[in-house]
Image (cartoon, helix red, strand yellow):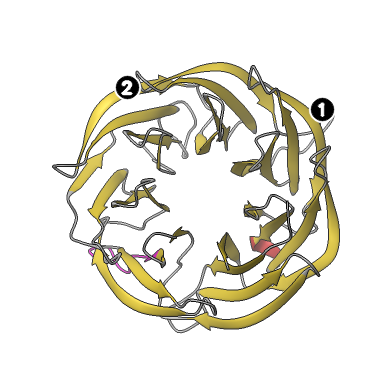
Amino acid sequence: MEAAKYIAYFSSYAGKETPGIYIYHFDEENEDLSFIEFVSGLKDPSFMKLSPKHETLYAFSQAEGDTAKSAAVAYRIEAGTGKLTYLGQQLTADKSSTHINTDHAEQFLMLVSYSGGTLSLLPLGEDGEISELSDQVRHEGSSITPKRQESAHPHSIYTDPTDQFVVVPDLGMDKIMVYRLDRAEGKLHPHDEVHLTPGSGPRHLTFHPTLDYAYVIQELSSTLTVLSYDRQAGKLEPVQIVNTLPEHYEGSDNSTAEVQVSPCGSFLYGSNRGHDSIVVFSIDPESGMLTLVDHTSTLGSHPRHFSLTPSGRYLFAANKDSDSVQLFKVDPESGKLSSTGQHISISQPTCVRFYPL
């Protein structure tokens, strides 16, 4: 694929008076990263979602105090420069938000609150503005791990490839909850639930771009579960479990974070916090099953998030505890990662997003 140019957005744990979102220009041709500006005024905007349709970036600002609500915030993306202009915000969860996304049609903004146990659905206007909450669902349940699974903890939210169903991994319940999206009413209706290994703690999920498979990374057990997907029925079924750590790793403090499939669909990547690595798997083009390829150090501590560029040629790893984002090149044949020697210093980076120019 041809080299491309992007605006790169990096969010962080930050107070309202300090930079929360950092904006860079990235040119794949010469691996050039250049700073544009930063945006402040948000408290801990730890996750972001870009909307190409609305030319908008969505983030959240966390609740402050026991009675406060967190807010979903919208910024218009300036054509050519990637600079952000504040559009507006709406209140969402009773407690802090954890993950933010849109449906594929970009008609709804979706958020989850890990601490509050809730899912929030907010309609989006024609210009990308956020409307008031149309639905909120609360999960009830628990699992076997003390302190981490004493109650429900939805950790991320997605729509399936058909855009008819909403899929929510819940770390506290060891389940993936599936809802039918009622677009006319702006509501989520319970549809199915997938039971995963007790104590595994599902965190993030991704669908394969062409095959009927999904992949969920499990924070507590350092595993990945492959799920076959019946898109007509909206049903997921576990078919394979693999470890994200090297076979002889003896550490006990690892927890996984992000999972992504390469744009070409040939490789899957997951991050290990503790082992501080990106694990690489090849994906069987027929069965969707995973085969281990490699582990690559993220050259930092606690890779909370990473993102592949839309071309699939580069991967940016956000090392939260070492205040750095490391840039890796992707081998198109093997999927393996190699350091470019490039990195940028950002205080507690938490999410990476790319906007093509």
Q: Counting residues from the N terminus, which is met first, the one under dot 1 or under dot 2?
A: 2
Circle 2: residue type? Asp
- How far across and down, in percent of the image, does residue 22 sit? 57, 75
Of helix, strand and loop, which one carries label 2? strand
Circle 1: residue type? Glu
- How far across and down, in percent of the image, does residue 160 sit? 41, 34
The residue shown at (54%, 68%) is 12
Majority secondary structure of magenta residues? loop
Nearest the viewer among 171 and 54 is 54
- How far across and down, in percent of the image, does residue 268 sit? 67, 36
Spatial CA span between label 1 and label 2: 34 Å
Extreme-left residue of the structure: 185
Q: Quadrant of residue 271?
A: top right
The residue shown at (65%, 55%) is 309
Q: Is residue 194 above or below residue 102?
A: above
Left or right: 90, with 141 as reference point = left
Left or right: 210, with 309 as reference point = left
Left or right: 186, with 144 as reference point = left
Q: Which residues are magenta?
A: 59-68
Q: Which mark is residue 247?
A: 1
Of helix, strand and loop, which one carries label 1? loop
| 11 falls in the magenta region | no
Mark 1 near mark 2, Cβ–Cβ under 8 Å?
no
Q: Which mark is residue 192?
A: 2
Q: Badge 2, how many Cα within 10 Å: few under 14, some, many 20+?
A: some
Q: Is residue 83 above or below residue 280?
A: below
Quadrant in which the C terminus appears: bottom right
Q: Is residue 204 above or below residue 52?
A: above
Using the rendered image of the protein, determine whether residue 346 is visible from the camera's viewpoint.
no
